[in-house]
Image (cartoon, helix red, strand yellow):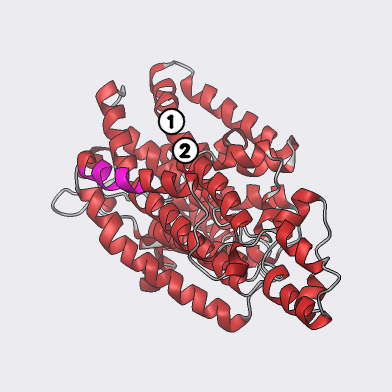
Amino acid sequence: MNDYCNDENLNRILPPEERNSGGKTRKRDDIQCLRGVAIIYVLLFHLFPSVFRKGFLGVDIFLVISGYLITMILSRNTPISLADTGTFFSKRIRRIFPAYYLMIFAVLVVGRIYLISYDQHLLAVDSGWSLAFLSNVHKYLQQKDYFAEAANYDFLLHAWSLAVEIQFYCVAPLFALIAHRLRLGKMLVATVAIGSFVVHVESTSELHFSSLPSRLWQFLAGSFAFEFHHRVNVLPAMACKMVAVIATFLLSPVILFIPNIEFLCRLTVTAAATLIIARISPSVNDFFISRTLLFIGDISYSLYLAHWPIIVFFRYMYHADQLLFKDCLVVAQLSVLLAYLSFKTIEKYFIRENLLKALLFISPIFFSSIILMKYPNAPLLILEQQTDRSSITTLLNNGSMSEIVKKTIRKKLLCFPLSRLSSENGDEFDAAECSNGQ
């Protein structure tokens, strides 16, 4: 989701058209634009879930891109050594961790100010799993469905994809070793990919959406795209161009409105992304390159981190299941602004620095987040935002209280997002009553 094809050591494994005259490998603009398309789809899905129902497929595109780029990075030195593995993880930490941990810390700080005590507790639990890149495991253990939670007030719901990506990084060097050291290594990796796809199709919704076993096939599809990239010249040029045009069409906004056959959509998008990334027809790939998509692709990682917490906080403050169109525009603009600042000040800085500087930046943020998780409640706002469900119930059951006061309590307190709390306690939460202030 967040790697760049700009390491000069890759020159010896990339074709001449992807190198700069000075010998350095240049960033592939088509992949950056594809990344831009992916984050736009995700953003549209989260802002307008009832309209862009298939926008979640943008994450599938990200996973294929990651598989391609990680395979490319690991293919610099074969066979891969322990030192190569250490360098690989050092770069992944510098690329991902600073912006990621800063996002979690910022969510905890804002949550400490605005959330009621029970929701602070939920956020603290979610943050603990997210800090360990295990949020997808947490959701599976809770048997939480992603699409049900997307309509709820889960501020770190989007962290699952980063968790899956980090988990893939942990096994990627092993797959690279198997593919290059064993005689039938690539066939073995292909078998694992097929098995992963079967798990994805046959498993429960909680498992198939956010677990590494059910997503591994998409990362490995990107790996196969890298291997195929160097053999594409053996195919007829016209056939390659036709296939590339079809793949581009399948990744167009049309995919957001096709019938609701999820696994077929996911298979289609993964195959199309694999073909585009393999660059089977450079002329077709270059056709959809634009400066706007390049810009969005550059900030896509920070935009992915920033957009969802902002959306949920807006919904939380307006106690709304879905934002108004004008609010969506504000959220989109704010997300892009914060993403651009993060890209310029965090991402670009730490990818050029050494691991020690990244760790010195991460450590205080990490431990400060733990402190906020351990002591979530703080008297930072007015009384009603520190009031839990039981206190509200006690007040509403007070027989001596006038109806006017009860209506005020309902509007000011009950209308705060308590759906997660209500579901935990088996209570009913009347959204109509909330909206009417009765």
C-alpha span from label 1 to label 2: 13 Å
- For the point 38% across and 65% down, the residue is 339
The x and y percentages for residue 350 are 25, 50
Above-or-below relation of 29 to 187 = below
Q: Nearer the viewer, residue 14 or 73?
A: 73
- For the point 54% across and 53% down, the residue is 156
User: Which of the image's four quarters has the C terminus?
Assistant: bottom right
Indicate whether residue 283 is drawn in magenta. no
Q: Nearer the viewer, residue 174 or 329?
A: 329
Q: Element type at marker 2?
A: loop
Check disc 2 and report the residue beneath it: 132
The x and y percentages for residue 213 are 60, 32
- For the point 59% across and 72% down, the residue is 317
Indicate whether residue 364 is drawn in magenta. yes
The x and y percentages for residue 159 are 52, 49
- For the point 41% across and 68% down, the residue is 293
Q: Which residues are magenta?
A: 357-366
Check disc 1 and report the residue beneath it: 170
Above-or-below relation of 357 to 203 = below
Q: Is residue 221 left or right of residue 231?
A: right
Image quadrant where residue 298 sits: bottom left
Q: Is residue 30 left or right of residue 377?
A: left
Q: Nearer the viewer, residue 45 or 429?
A: 429
Image quadrant where residue 257 sits: bottom right
Q: Element type at marker 1?
A: helix
Image quadrant where residue 148 sits: bottom right
Q: Residue lying furthest top in this view?
A: 183
Predominant secondary structure, magenta span = helix
Task: Report the number of discs.
Answer: 2
